Structure formats: structure tokens, C-alpha cells
Amino acid sequence: MTDSSAPKSLQSRGVIVASLLTLALFSGVVHGYLDGRWTTQTSRSDQGALLNQLPITVGPWKLLDEQDLPESAQRLLRCYGSVVRVYQHTETGVMVNFAVMYGPRGPIAVHTPEVCYSSVGTKQTRPRRTETFKTKENRHQVWSVEFSRDDEPEASLAVYYGFSDGGAFVAADSPRFWLTDDLYKIQLAGPVTGSAIDPCHSFLEAFLPHLEKLVQ
């Protein structure tokens, strides 16, 4: 007598194995899509190069220093283009550190200041909040958060950041899941002065009208 259950058992195992392989493949594709692996770089590098056209003087702010994105950050973020600069207010002497990056959605989205700054000895002193900037073309919103250094009782560092898929910058919670291949990220750090004029806010008011023309 033959065991008729054997073929059914083998068939069931085959279905299970095929299902697991399909799930693994699907998960890999989804992760690759979210991580920005399935993109071509030629045209994106041309688009990223446009960021070099950002002005060296805007309003009362003047370029003081410019650097390349550190090699470790470049490997991590896989940027198609980036600008890292220090601007100084010509009247007060206050300086801000400014960076704008353009790259695959996944790496650009996940590295937020709350994670990065907290890992280098600073402490977040308040929940992040949104800051709004209106230009002739757009209504931008970015996050602002403050940190203290070396166990200081008061915040001494303000950081502003936001994301764009080619339009207005947004204070987004989960830009990694936007239906776009690439993202722009703007990040700005400056001192908490306690004065009526916030250096970071003042800088972005002057700068965003120029930046939005290059973000496409």
C-alpha cells in the first residue's frame, strides 16, 4: 500500500518555502525602496550641484566658512549634493552653522538632530516645535529643538530642521515613508541668545526665498 499523504506533505512544504521566499524578497524590495537603493544617480547629481548656487551673502548674513560634508556622513547619507557653511551676522557677529543635503529618502530622513546631538554629550531641553516661514512662493515649516551642553542648566544651542520633496519644507514626522525617491533636508544650528531676535529664525527668513528656487 502506498502512502498517499506523502505527496501532499511535500506539496505543503513547498508552498510554505515558496511563501517564505516571496515574503523575504518582498521585504527586501520594500526596504530597498525606503532606503533609496533603486535610484539612478546621474541626473540627481546634476540636481544636487545646483545647491552650490546658494548665495554667499543674504540680508545681514555673510558666508564665513564653507566645508565639504564629512566623508563619514557622506557614506552614511549617500548625498547627491550638499552644502555645509558657516554664516555670520554682519552687525552682531553671531554665527550659525547651515547645511542642506539632497539624497535618497531613507538615509536623509532617519538621521535627526534629536538622535545625532544626543549622542555627543548634549541634552535636549524641550520638546521640538514647529516654526513657520512665509515667502512669496511657499509656506515653509521646520522643526526647532534646543539642547544644553556639559550639564549647563539652560539651553545654549538651537537646531532647526525640515524636509522637502521638491516643494515647501515640512516639519514632518515620518518623511521616510513619503512617496518620493529623494529628499532635501535643511539643518541649521545656532546659539540661544535670549534676545528678541533668534539667530536661526532670522537666518531662515532671509535664506529660504533663495533656497526654494533651487529645490525641485
Image: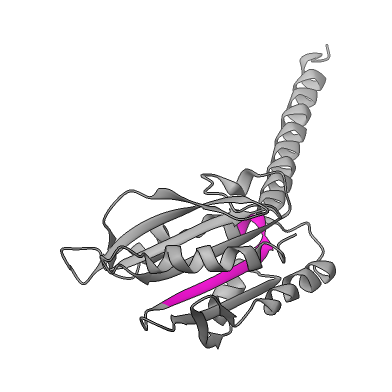
Instruction: Classify residue 174 by image quadrant.
Output: top right
Instruction: Classify residue 15 by image quadrant.
Output: top right
Q: Is residue 99 magenta?
A: yes
Q: Quadrant of the N terminus?
A: top right
* 50 shown above or below 12: below
Q: Quadrant of the C terminus?
A: bottom right
Foreground pick, 204 / 215: 204
Principal secondary structure, stretch drawn in magenta: strand
Provide residue 122's location: percent of width, then percent of height: 29, 67
- At 71% from the left edge and 44% from the top edge, which residue is drawn? 179
Foreground pick, 209 / 173: 209
Q: Is residue 168 left or right of residue 38?
A: left
Q: Is residue 41 left or right of residue 167?
A: right
* 194 shown above or below 70: above
Identify the magenta region.
96-107
- At 64% from the left edge and 54% from the top edge, which residue is drawn? 164
Does residue 179 appear in the picture of this structure?
Answer: yes
Q: Is residue 5 left or right of residue 77?
A: right
Does residue 69 appear in the picture of this structure?
Answer: no
Q: Is residue 178 magenta?
A: no
Provide residue 28's location: percent of width, then percent of height: 70, 48
Q: Residue furthest bottom?
A: 65
Provide residue 134's location: percent of width, then percent of height: 56, 52
- At 65% from the left edge and 76% from the top edge, which residue is drawn? 54
- At 46% from the left edge and 76% from the top edge, which residue is drawn? 97
Provide residue 81's location: percent of width, then percent of height: 69, 73
